[in-house]
Image: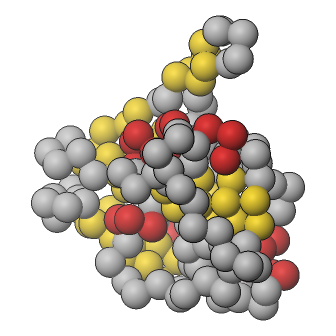
Amino acid sequence: MRLEGSCHCRTVRFSLESRNPVPYQRCYCSICRKTNGGGGYAINLSGDYESLEVEGKRHIRAYQAVLRADDGTETRSEAQRMFCAHCGSGLWLYDERWPDLVHPFASAIDTPLPVPPEHTHLMLRYAPDWVEPQIGENDKRFEEYPEESIADWHRRLGMEE
């Protein structure tokens, strides 16, 4: 499926191919919530990095999140969260460890997306008290990361494009 996306001010526009376009995975970690959320969670999709086309590249900035362990140690994430330098909209995540993949944020996608038959709620351990996850009957819950990848979820439900 061809996905078209943009930032809020439309200075940055992008498109890419995605075999896994269903916005089913809700991440409650503080990085996703604070850099690309507002409603208590964020949704990342998956796409083919080689197909990514971008207009307005010079207006893109990258953020590499600080990872804080339970013991207080800090490290810098290898993943780059791309955002618009003008309006601050989150656009996608890229990690050189998986060079074939790019993870556009569902909130930046302008193309109508398929409705998921179930959701996966992950990183619930990090959800703040004010967040009340709306967990459906068929939804999956994980305190941390599930073993099932975005591609595996799409295959299991026959929703791969």
**Vertical order, 37 against 45 (above or below):** above
Q: Is residue 20 visible?
A: no
User: Residue 109 placed where, x, y %?
Assistant: 38, 72
**In the figure, is residue 113 to the left or right of 148?**
left
**In the figure, is residue 101 to the left or right of 90?**
right
User: Residue 55 placed where, x, y %?
Assistant: 25, 63
**In the figure, is residue 4 to the left or right of 97?**
left
Number of labelled discs? 0
Residue ID at (47%, 84%)? 113
**Vertical order, 16 against 103 (above or below):** below
User: Residue 52 placed where, x, y %?
Assistant: 45, 65
User: Residue 139 placed where, x, y %?
Assistant: 73, 73
130 or 74: which is nearer to us? 130
**Vertical order, 38 against 76 (above or below):** below
Residue ID at (64%, 68%)? 135
Name which quarter of the figure residue 63 lies in.
top left
Residue ID at (61%, 83%)? 116
45 or 59: which is nearer to us? 45
